Image (cartoon, rainbow, N blue to C red):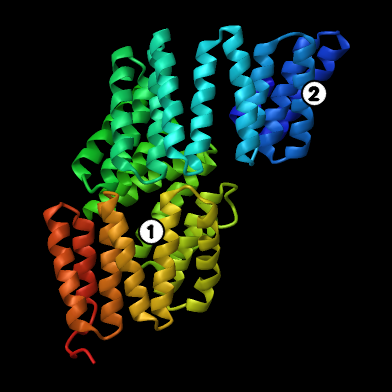
Amino acid sequence: MRAWAWELRGEPNEVAKYARAAAGEAERRGANHLTARARLSEARALFDSGDAKAAIAALDDAIDRFRKAENRKEVAAAYELKAEEETDLDTARQLLEIARRIYREGGYRNAEAWVLMNLGYRLFENERRDEAETLFAEAMALFDGLGAREDKAAALVNIGASYQMQGDLSKARARYTEALAVFQDLGNELWTAMVLTNIGEILYLAGDLDGARRMHEEALAVNRRLGDEAGVAYDNYRLGMVFVARGDWGRARQRYEGALASQQRLAKQADAAETRLALAELELIEKNFANSEKLARQVVGASDLADKEALAQVLLARTLLAQGRMVDARPFAEAAADAAVESDDQRVHFGAAFVRARLRAAAGEVDGALADLAELATRASAKGRLLDSFEVRLAMGEIELDAGRIDAGRHRLAKLHDDADATGVQGIVRRVEKLLAGRSLAKSPA
């Protein structure tokens, strides 16, 4: 029980310590099955702590003990865990196929369906979408045959997240919407809140700020009923982003600061990192460069999650470039570009490409930077990411003004102003107006 409490606090080394002690006690009593389960818990904790070598040793010991105890279901679960940590796709697939066969032969059809889902995720991550979707369909059919509505809905959420990660917002929203109807029908408020938040994120990216706000406020109300402080904090963070896009920066700051205070108190470090970066972005928009840099640096090097680290590097590079510190910005932009090669997160890909183009512009490669940004804007629009496309167009207009291409810059920004105003993205409208008001545009372009 105590080991579980430590796990909830996110301290895997302590979980491993107590699990190891439990394994030793069980072994002294001759309880081989309990020893195996404790070793399995130890392996999970060691993987979380980053000690893969020790984790594999504990996991193999657990598998051997489960085999001796003839507990085939636990053997299959151990193979699933091993596959989860395996970096080679073919090896992971072999491990999952073994787990699937064991579950199928034992009649554990629900577990078999989840193995299909897990294998589908791995294939999806490796750009083998057709194979993944075939496995997803097999899993859905198994869930339907079992009448496992809640499992199917949870699987739909995971499929939606896979589509969202790769930028297919329409398919992601469809999966989330289907899952939401099931969870609401079953009265499962925990999952309902999570899916509402996911749909809100998609609507935000698409520029439907009214819809996004409605989803996040509904999720906030559910999380308050549940007493889920972390969920409330996360929804406030997301509402802050909506208010930034709306141009209501004072309300956005209130939401961010309230969310960050809760996340720090609850030791939700990953969520706190997201909120710090959002607050840093707001400081950058308001040209409070020292504050933006300070917040971004608090995340750079402090996150053990590669994608958050990369996003922090992007924001720090942008902040430094805004201050004319191109030499200081370059290492962070390059680090983000390296991270994007390994990342499945579209935010990392977009951010790295965006800051690389800004760096080219700062180095005087204006035409190359504009070409890169035009391509990025086209990709964002094709994926339905309206806010990203607006952000790119704003940068292009600013680059043109800085390069003395006044007519081109003003024309681009005027069109952006009208488009943003028509879609209710007043944050972009305000930024365009501030940009034009802060420049002397009397000179003709060279």
Question: What percent of the width, then of the height, locates residue 256?
Answer: 37, 47
Q: Residue at x 34, y 45 (%)?
A: 255
> From what the image shows, is residue 371 above or below residue 347?
below
> From what the image shows, is residue 141 above or below residue 106?
below
Q: Residue at x 76, y 17 (%)?
A: 36
Q: Residue at x 41, y 52 (%)?
A: 347
- Left or right: 397 as drawn, with respect to 56: left
- Left or right: 408 as drawn, with respect to 266: left
Question: What percent of the width, then of the height, locates residue 118?
Answer: 52, 29
The answer to whether one can see residue 3 in this image is yes
* Mark 2 → mark 1, Cα distance in angstroms: 48 Å
**How packed is label 1: few (under 14 Cα within 10 Å), some, or many (20 or more)?**
many
Where disc 2 sits, the SS reads helix
> Which numbered marker is on residue 281?
1
> From what the image shows, is residue 192 above or below residue 401?
above
Location of the N terminus (image quadrant) = top right
Q: Nearer the viewer, residue 64 or 407?
A: 64
Where disc 1 sits, the SS reads helix
The answer to whether one can see residue 233 in this image is no
**Which amino acid, mark 2?**
Asp
Total numbered labels = 2
Question: What percent of the width, then of the height, locates residue 240?
Answer: 32, 47
**Outermost residue to the right:** 28
Does the residue at mark 2 contact the one at mark 1 (Cβ under 8 Å)?
Answer: no
**Which amino acid, mark 1?**
Glu
> From what the image shows, is residue 438 above or below residue 251?
below
Q: Nearer the viewer, residue 241 or 307?
A: 307
**How packed is label 2: few (under 14 Cα within 10 Å), some, or many (20 or more)?**
some
Question: What percent of the width, then of the height, locates residue 383?
Answer: 30, 49
> Which numbered marker is on residue 166?
none
Q: Residue tagged by mark 2?
A: 61
